[in-house]
Image (cartoon, rainbow, N blue to C red):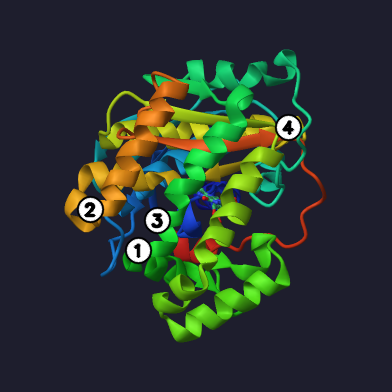
Amino acid sequence: MSAEETVQKWIEVARWSPSADNTQPWRVTWAAPDPQTITLVLRKTPLGAGSTPIENELQQLALGSLLTSITLVASEDGYVVHQRAASDDGLTLQLKMSTVKTEGWSELLRRRHTNRRPLNRLPLSPEQLEFVGQVCAEHQGLSLIDFSSQKKKAARLVARLDLIRYQSRQHLDHLLKVLRFEAKAVDGLDVKSLDIPLAAIALFWLLNRWRTLRVIFFLGLEKIFAFVGCRWLIQQSGHFYLLRAQDSSLSSWLEVGRCLQKIWLEATRRNLGLQPFGHTFITYEAHKNPEQFSRDHLELIGQVQEELLRLHPSAQLSTAGIFFRLGKPHKQPVVRSKRRSVAELLAP
Ligand SMILES: Cc1cc2nc3c(=O)[nH]c(=O)nc-3n(C[C@H](O)[C@H](O)[C@H](O)COP(=O)(O)O)c2cc1C
């Protein structure tokens, strides 16, 4: 197989990596300086106008998940990844051929997806969950906080943060921007893949037309959204975790992304469902850009953070990190998310 065919095969699989709102914020260029070596440059896509205050961090997290995917899929061909350079724009990797090959990652990388909702309350045994801590320990500077025994309290707190997403113009505008109603869209959140009731899809469609927040406030609908889309989901799932780094450097966001994807793949191997909870990035945003939030919202965020710290003294939400639910899926997924083509990702 030529170097070009090899790279195309890797990207075909790795592009199924997760990214917040399915933005797939990555492009890849490559070179083959000698028959044993392939160089890959993973570039973040430029941030568009009206991007969220932490889009750069979310891109870095997504780059981390892509890095894990490329590392694993390349290992099937016997390649070992060495990180050569890192900057705010992306990473340069050198992949060297070795004699050791590992099997089976492509299949897991293709099978993993968000729509296997872990909506089965039954807790898993400590042995079944051991892999989560083991994977976390392989990633430098990360820690894992298990809220599973305090799910109800954590769910109530996280749902209070979720409310802000519907009450703030900036966040609702962002949600409407990433929702996709057209079948041909290859990025963003295809409403059919969201696994939400038809009535909610219809409502999103109407909101998309109206683009007005006042209607939501008038009807008080944001409380129902935060309950169904957040509090209830957490209460119904087997386990709820926070994966976090010690600081908020871009390399920590990369590491969180690398680790999340590995935990997700190991969960997929065990036929478990996982769903990240990006709602809670609000606290990080408020820490980074307090001027973007109203006084009421800053107060609410402060209270929630305090109460979370009472649940667990390390549950600090001002550094790189992400919440996720984990457990047995309740049913087979129906529709899955889409991806950009290999040609688009490899375009110079
Ligand atoms: C940082 C991050 C945050 C995410 N937050 C959420 C979330 O709050 N709710 C959700 O349902 N999915 C969330 N996801 C899942 C993405 O929407 C999903 O990975 C993307 O749409 C691609 O779909 P797939 O995972 O099915 O391939 C998140 C993923 C990432 C990487």
Find residue 164 and name its label. 3
- Which residue type carries mark 1? Ser
- Residue furthest to the left: 291
CB under 8 Å between discs 1 and 2: no
- Which residue type carries mark 3? Ile
Of callouts 4 and 1, which one flags the residue occurring earlier in the amino acid sequence? Answer: 1
Distance CA(mark 2)–CA(mark 4): 45 Å
- Residue furthest to the bottom: 209
Q: Secondary structure at mark 4?
A: helix
Q: Label 2, on which residue?
A: 295
Distance CA(mark 4)–CA(mark 1): 38 Å
- Which residue type carries mark 4? Arg
- Which quadrant of the view contains residue 50? bottom left
Q: Label 1, on which residue?
A: 168
For label 3, the crowd category at 10 Å Cα-Cα, with few meaning under 14, some 14 to 19 and many 20 or more, is many
Q: Label 4, on which residue?
A: 269
